Image: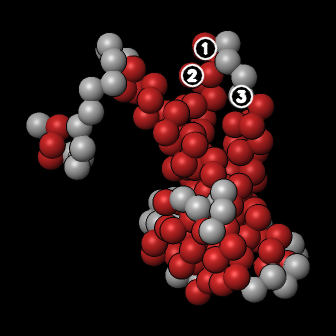
Amino acid sequence: MLASFTELVEHVGPLGTGHRLKLLHNYVSVGFMTLLAEAAAQAADANVDPKRFVEILAKGGGASVALDRMAPFITDGDREGLPFFVSNGRKDIEYYRTMSEQAGAHKTIADGIHAALTAAVDSGHGQAYVPELVRIFRKG
């Protein structure tokens, strides 16, 4: 049954561990994409060539699947590489924050990501795809 929902099924521990790991994964993924969008917006505002921005990140610590999926928007305005709504990203971060609060864990960075995504949703961009955060985060 699980195979019909996913390409990969992994045993990660006792009951509840898979859910916790999914929230951790989504936090890292959405968090990195939000951080990347803010950096790309800053680069665009500073007239850094978007192709060079992506190339340089891809050669260093910024290399990731998230960069690969967001690069088409950063370089060419193509949002289809990551058809995931900003409102869904915010929801995932809210779940992570709840889990963190219940565990007594730090969530300072998650709070910042949540604030950035909430501002985008509150300004009418909840149905934008996550790569479009680059445009949303640009100044004026």
Identify the residue at image location x=27%, y=26%. Answer: 11
Label annotation for residue 107: 3
Please identify the quarter of the rendering in which residue 100 is found. top right
Q: Are marks 2 and 1 in contact (CB under 8 Å)?
A: yes
At horizontal 57% and vertical 43% (from top left) the residue drawn is 28
Is residue 95 among what the camera can see? yes
Query: Relative to 89, is 41 above or below?
Result: below
* Percent position of residue 86, x then y: 58, 57
- The amino acid type, in three-letter code, at marker 3 is Lys
Tell which of 84 and 50 is nearer to you.
50
Of labels 2 and 3, earlier in sequence is: 2
Which element carries disc 2, helix, strand or loop?
Answer: helix
Q: Along the line of sight, which residue is nearer the eye, 58 or 47?
A: 58
- Residue extending furthest toward the front: 59
Q: Is 88 positioned to the left or the right of 17 in the image? A: right
Q: Could you tell me which secondary element the residue under label 1 belongs to?
A: helix
Q: Residue at x 72, y 23 (%)?
A: 106
Instruction: Specify which label sits upstream in the sequence, 1 or 3.
Output: 1
- From this viewpoint, is residue 138 visible? no
Q: Which mark is residue 26?
A: none
Q: Nearer the viewer, mark 1 or mark 3?
A: 3
The amino acid on which the numbered mark 1 sits, given as a three-letter code, is Gln
- What residue lies at 68% left-to-right and 51% top-to-bottom? 117
The residue pinned by badge 2 equals 99
The residue that label 1 is drawn on is 102
Q: Does the CB distance between marks 1 and 3 fall below 8 Å?
A: no
CA–CA distance in space, label 2 to label 3: 10 Å
- In the displayed structure, does residue 38 sit left or right of residue 71? right
